[in-house]
Image (cartoon, grey):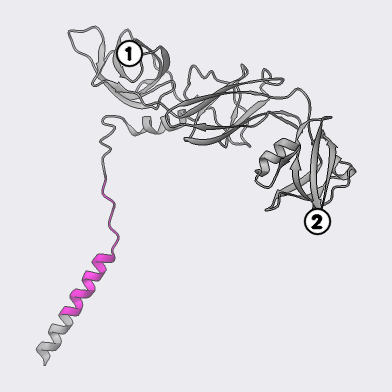
Amino acid sequence: MHRNRALALLVALVLVLSLVAWLWPRPEPEVADAAKPGIPQPYLDHWGKVLSQHRRSPDEPRTTPKSLDEPAPETNVAMAELGPGEVRCQLIGFEGSTNGVLQAADGVRFVSTADGEVILPGITGDGAGMLEVTGFKPVPVQWQFRESEAFGHCLKPIELESVTRVIGTVTGPGVEDGLVDVSICGILMDVETDGTFGTVVEPGSCRIQASRQDGALFAPSKAIHVNVPEGETVEVELAVPDAIRGGIGARVEASEDGIRIVDVIPDGAAADRGLQAGDIVTEVDGELTADMELQDFIDWVGGASGTSVSVTFLRNGRTQTVELKRRPVN
């Protein structure tokens, strides 16, 4: 009996120890990134930021405009001191002339491409870095020098992969003064003082709209909806209006039947023509609103102050159509 009891206790102890070992947290094994041999992690981290250098959130201050043709790194990254040598690397996927930047251990340097090659200037020894050619995704590169040659070579050809992006121009007042922003697929950006803009985006449907901020008054361009194919660049043109932005003087929300008026602003156009909270706007300038996005409706009824828009609304089973003259929005 004592032998059976001891055996039972031993089995129970083994089961408890096995359970504890199974539940005890294990450290995650380190996995090397074989796709980027020889490229220090700080380079990779830096280039995740370079692609978004022109972006900002709505509450960020406006930055000094940068040229899209010369993608500059952030200001805390030092420029390299160029030596007498250079490295020449064969390109796959691009044979034209453009420029870009190389981030290496000694800092950042501008590079150029021509005839299927990219020239990395001011390099005299073996090394590695991260290369971004304008219009293509950043790619890691490694190079070496041979004693019998005057310039270095990349260890293998550089295969460029196109980025998916939207670029364009904006015309109208306020552009040269740096007062115009552009929203691209939900990304808010500064428009350069020469009217250019551009950023990398996710493939798919994209809404683009520029706007000028004059104090408290907001003057947007007409919104453009585009489909951006993967790996391609879509170019658009926008124009911000000369006139002050105007509206109908109502707060609205989307509903199954159309656009519902939540409130009307005293002394606004909607209030003067008798619109009330609870009215359902079913048409605007003859266009049905039932399947209209709320932002598209807001863009439609808004416009240059002093112009008119036709609004059809439903109240107690009866429809009425009125002309509303847009007034300044603040």
The residue carrying pointer 2 sits among few (fewer than 14), some (14 to 19) or many (20 or more) residues within 10 Å by Cα, namely: few
At label 2, the amino acid type is Gly
**In the foreground, 92 or 236:** 236
Magenta segment = 11-30
**In the foreground, 117 or 52:** 117
Q: Main secondary structure of the magenta part?
A: helix
- Percent across and percent down for residue 204 are 49, 36
Disc 1 to disc 2, C-alpha distance: 69 Å
Q: Which residue is mark 2?
A: 317
- Percent across and percent down for residue 318 are 83, 53
Q: Residue furthest left?
A: 3
The quadrant where residue 215 appears: top right
| Contact, mark 1 vs mark 2 (Cβ under 8 Å) | no
Residue drawn at the location 59% of the way across and 30% of the way down: 189
The N terminus - image quarter: bottom left
Q: Is residue 208 left or right of residue 203?
A: right
Q: Which residue is mark 1?
A: 116
